[in-house]
Amino acid sequence: MVAFFKAVHQKYQSEAVGYLYYCPTTSEWEYVVPKQSAGPAHASYEGAPKKAGWQCAGTIHSHAAMSAFHSGVDDADEENFDGVH
């Protein structure tokens, strides 16, 4: 995920967003990148796709060149579904 965020920032100077999925039968984690539109201080993206046997456990996104903080995107994610954000 970190490499993906760094690559997006280097190429587009923007944030990037993804969903965290957990498979309870295998204890595996996966990062899924949805279709999105993002800029240096915002991100808009599609809802979490369904993955048979997997649970969407939350979201993760970068803040481009800004430091980490609980953003408006985080607030919106928490309102829409339970999980880590």
Image (cartoon, helix red, strand yellow):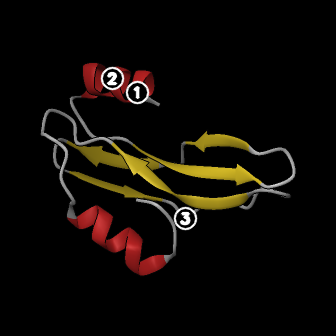
- Tell me the quarter of the picture where residue 2 sits: top left
**Distance between the alpha carbons at the discs numbered 1 and 3:** 21 Å
Tag in front: 1 or 3:
1
Q: Position of residue 31 (x, y in %)?
A: 59, 41
Task: Relative to 65, say whether 39 is above or below.
Answer: below
- Look at the numbered disc 1 and give the secondary structure of its residue: helix
Q: How many marks?
A: 3
Identify the secondary structure beneath mark 3.
loop
Q: Is residue 44 left or right of residue 40?
A: right
Toward the viewer: 45 or 22? Answer: 22
Point 84% across, 44% down: residue? 26
> Relative to residue 81, is residue 23 depicted above or below?
above
The label number, if any, that marks residue 47 in the structure image: 3
Residue type at tag 1: Val
Residue 49 in sight in this render: no
The amino acid type of the residue labelled 2 equals: Lys
Label 3, residues with CA under 10 Å away: few <14, some 14-19, many ≥20: few
- For the point 21% across and 60% down, the residue is 71
Give the label, 1 or 2, closer to the camera.
Answer: 1
Q: CA distance from mark 3 to mark 2?
A: 23 Å
Asked if labels 2 and 1 touch by Cβ distance under 8 angstroms, the answer is yes
Which residue is depicted at the point 71% across and 61% down? 55
* Mark 3: amino acid: Gly
Quadrant for the C terminus in the image? bottom left
| First in sequence: mark 1 vs mark 3 | 1
What is the distance, in whole Å, between disc 1 and disc 2 at their CAs? 6 Å
Residue 2 image label: 1
Q: Quadrant of residue 44?
A: bottom left
Q: Nearer the viewer, mark 3 or mark 2?
A: 2
Residue 59 x, y percent position in the rendering:
47, 55
Q: Please name the residue that numbered disc 2 is placed on.
A: 6
